[in-house]
Amino acid sequence: MYSQAKVIAGGLAHIPVVIAVFYFILTTFNKRALKFVEESKAKKPEAKVVEPKKVDVSKAESSKVETTKTKITNVEAPKVVKKKHADVPVNIYRPKTPYEGTVIDNYSLLKEGAIGRVNHITFDLKDSDPFLNYVEGQSIGIMPAGEDANGKPHKLRLYSIASTRHGDNFNGTTVSLCVRQLQYEKDGETINGVCSTYLCDIKPGDKVKITGPVGKEMLLPDEEDANIVMLATGTGIAPMRAYLRRMFEATEKEKNNWNFKGKAWLFMGAPKSANLLYEEDLQRYLADYPDNFKYTKAISREQQNTKGGRMYIQDRVLESANELFNMIENEKTHIYLCGLKGMEPGIDEAMTKAAEEKGLNWAELRPQLKKAGRWHVETY
Ligand code: FAD
Ligand code: A2P
């Protein structure tokens, strides 16, 4: 028989069990709610200029990094490489729902006597919602107005972004491009490229359909003491212009708080001196940062290579083989190649010869540099 006291004691004994069950339900619910909030945050693009977190590789969590080793003994890959640039924005705007940006500026980058037409074009992004943010080394898509021969809207064309994320006016709401008008002769007729002509002709105030941003191939490393070798032909200077502004432009440096301490070496190919792009800025960076910036030009129709042919950047690479490969042996050196697709075989050949002079095998070395995230190519 149960006494009243026993019943009360039995009831009291169940209280901890009830509390434990209640606590379990509460914590499970909280965890799920937190996870949902984190996931929602991750999906939403940032509506402001984002500076990447500085990466202290020595403290990087092992789950977020991968370790790379290289077979070649005297060219080491970085010990840790960021697995994914998860914080880099992509495809905020797609072709079905592009952002209509307003043209702020469109001017020629060429001097008198230059060949062709190359323009610097800036778009206002401030009304984009979600905000169209981007980082140096990315591209945007442009959808030219009008229709193709089949009556369909023109497809988008990609253009490398030539501005830093803070924009040319440093207010963080513009994007700039460096565009060459495509022109070629066919059956005695001059053919103008659809999108490049559209872009070179647009006027301030015009609305332009923009997609993107896209691309993670040409991103700069976070390390302030990285070395950056840049091989550019023509408009291939676009991403390099953004890198160099990030490194050396005074107001930009104040904004980005990224104190570049490495060496930046630009090899630039242009047909004539009058075709050199952003030349005044580059000369200013040379004067201001002689220890950090080196600038080597190949002016194909004014200079000759040792064989008496047109001077191309690969000829300059060969001239500088020793110094260049000393840099490449440093695991903090990244190489960026941008511009004409046609230059790739020539660059490969030059790198092969240059590597041989150092007793290295470029065919083995290049894939290792690529794997280590140090060899970046965007040609078109
Ligand atoms: P289209 O009207 O599309 O004509 C191009 C077509 O014309 C070619 O596909 C080919 O079929 C034909 N064609 C071209 N040349 C000849 C020839 N000599 N003889 C016969 N037929 C020919 N461009 C820039 O100016 N600046 C940049 O920063 C830039 N960045 C880029 C970044 C990326 C990632 C990529 C993929 C491309 C980039 N481009 C850049 C190139 C750009 O996307 C366009 O391809 C270029 O502007 C030409 O487009 P279009 O509409 O004017 O030419
Ligand atoms: P060129 O046209 O004299 O043969 P732009 O885009 O302003 O025309 O500049 C491209 C530069 O790249 C030019 O100097 C051009 O020289 C040069 N170039 C052309 N073909 C190659 C190639 N295969 N390798 C390297 N540079 C090249």
Image: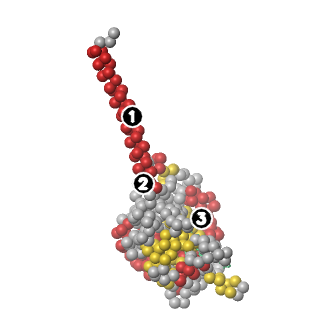
The answer as to whether callout 3 falls within 8 Å of ligand 2 is no
- Local secondary structure at mark 1: helix
Instruction: Kindly report the distance in space between the C-alpha atoms of the residues bearing marks 3 and 2.
Output: 47 Å
Residue 218 seen by the camera: no
Instruction: Kindly report the distance in space between the C-alpha atoms of the residues bearing marks 1 and 3.
Output: 63 Å
Q: Position of residue 345 (x, y in %)?
A: 64, 69
- Local secondary structure at mark 3: helix
Disc 3 target residue: 355
Which amino acid type corresponds to the residue marked 3 in the rendered image?
A: Ala
Answer with mark 1 or mark 3, whichever residue precedes in sequence: 1
Label 3 vs label 2, nearer the camera: 2
Q: Residue at x 55, y 67 (%)?
A: 95
Q: Position of residue 353 (x, y in %)?
A: 62, 68
Q: Which mark is residue 24?
A: 1
Answer with mark 3 or mark 2, whichever residue precedes in sequence: 2
Q: Residue at x 49, y 72 (%)?
A: 100
- Observer-nearest residue: 78 or 164? 164
> How many C-alpha atoms fall within 10 Å of the one at disc 1: few (<14), some, or many (≥20)?
few
Q: How is the image coloured?
A: secondary structure
Instruction: Specify the farthest residue to the top.
Output: 1
Label 1 vs label 3, nearer the camera: 1
Image quadrant of ligand 1? Answer: bottom right
Is the residue 376 above or below the residue 275 in the image?
A: above
Q: Residue at x 57, y 85 (%)?
A: 116
Is the residue 191 above or below the residue 127 in the image?
A: below
Q: Which mark is residue 331?
A: none
Q: Which mark is residue 41?
A: 2
Circle count: 3
Is the residue 275 above or below the residue 259 in the image?
A: below
Q: Position of residue 252 (x, y in %)?
A: 38, 71
Which amino acid type corresponds to the residue marked 1 in the rendered image?
A: Phe
